[in-house]
Amino acid sequence: MAVESGELASSQFQEALTLIELGRPFEALPLLAEVISLRPDFVEAYVQRARLRRRLNDLEGAIADYAKAIKLAPTVELYLARALVWLGLGKAEGAVGDARKAIALDPGLAGGHRLLGKALGSLGDGVGAIAAYKQAARCYIEAKDKENAALCLGRIKGLRSLPLLSVGQQRAISSDQDTTAQVSATPAAFLKLLWQKYGQKQYRAVLKDADWLLACEAENVEAMCLRGLAYAHIGKAQQAVEDFARATRLAPEDTTVRLHRASMRLALSDGAGAVEDLSVLIEMVGPESRFFAQRAAAYRSIEDLESAFKDYANALAVEPENAELYQHRAEVQQAMGEKTGAIEDYQKAATLWLNNGKWAEHQQVVEAVRQLRSQQATASARKSGSSVPIKSFDRHLPVVEVLMDGIATFDIVIDRNASHSIITQKMAQQLNLELVSYRYIYLADGTPMELPLARLRSVAIGGTVITDVYVAVASNQETPLLGKDCFGGYSIRISGNEITFSR
């Protein structure tokens, strides 16, 4: 049995490699998942899936796969590959760690020293970056690679041109071992790291580091805004207002200060004040998408949905390919009871999220569309309360005849406890279905597996018709079934050799 599993895994892995070469990554992913389930120690399968995920912009997934591969077989190549993904995520600390591990395995690795220099430079550690680039240049020279050695030396010149911290700032760094400033060689780099922490909702850490920077540069307006925003998010309204009052006095014409003040007001539940600030910005600067989007959020906070809808429409006129704006406008329309318009906007958002490789966001809007369509289908569905004969039983579960998309009928298991519906690859091909996304699904035996999803326009069981059903497409060996995601709005009763569906 183990030999058969190994042979099957090897066969599927080769098939996945072929699909990758043909430019069909979405078909290769589930095959690689099957290979890994059959052979959890297959390092190359993790590596190939990591590369695919990186290519599809699923960087967190790529990190996870490289981690598994490294645990099984830590190599220089894997550490460097993961370091590049860390950089893509904007997490240079992870790239520094992996570059150093690669160098520990091969001290003469020019590429490792070069990557370390890049990562340290992005963190603002000019001294460390210069040292790493120098070592990379030495390694390239030993390898008689003058071109890459020259490139590394050129990078050193650029790092030396960066402004240095003052003596007082250097002392502050050495006296506070926990501050972010330890890894920052310039105030600009330091502020960049603070904005990253703010985006990660590390508000108390932002307060601590902003206090340090303001102690060094008392009139740093950007640091004041950051600290004021952090104060607002932890509920310290007075301190937040004081910081923004001071920032406004120092830079009365700075539109960025007003924009941040609007964000502060939103955090303090002052939606009307945020609307006021953003309206002034639109008059001063012009119709920028970010101003309209933030004012729309402010209008939503005070339940002025009509104004929010108009602002999202204005933002989309400026930035028509922004998935997040479509999603927000769909949410507003849904709150207004405009289901048709909401569905259209959600669908547009789903397409754009998928094009951008944002799988989690895509899934969220797909689910919103499914729920809205399910509500709409209530009025147009055929007569409920219909009964159909049970053809057989599979593991004590009823099997009935199901017409899918009005094209073909299949014998399908009805499982009221299953979370997701599943069809086979052969059925999907017969119905000519297109894959729309991916999702982790529990198979009938309880095994979790990442499978592609397809959309069925209709599922008809006797007189009961359900529209817009998303099904997972599994291997031909799996048992096709319809679960709760299909019959969420129905009551199912089994009596003798019949099964009845009713509202």
Image (spheres, rainbow, N blue to C red):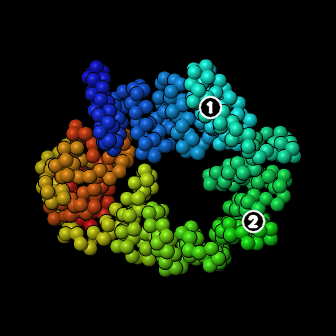
- Number of marks: 2
Q: Position of residue 172 (x, y in %)?
A: 84, 44
Q: Position of residue 458 (x, y in %)?
A: 22, 61
Binning the other alpha carbons within 10 Å of mark 1 as few (below 14), some (14 to 19) or many (20 upward) gives some
SS for callout 2: helix
Residue drawn where x is 32% and y is 33% of the image:
17
Q: Position of residue 353 (x, y in %)?
A: 42, 56
Residue drawn where x is 21% and y is 39% of the image:
476
Q: Is residue 485 left or right of residue 459?
A: right
Which image quadrant: the C terminus?
bottom left
Q: Mark 1 sits on what residue?
A: 150
Inspect the image, locate mark 1, and give the three-letter code of the amino acid beneath it: Ala
Q: Is residue 469 left or right of residue 286?
A: left
Question: Can see residue 216?
Answer: yes
Q: Position of residue 285 (x, y in %)?
A: 62, 73
Q: Mark 2 sits on what residue?
A: 240
Inspect the image, locate mark 2, and give the three-letter code of the amino acid beneath it: Ala
Image quarter of residue 396: top left
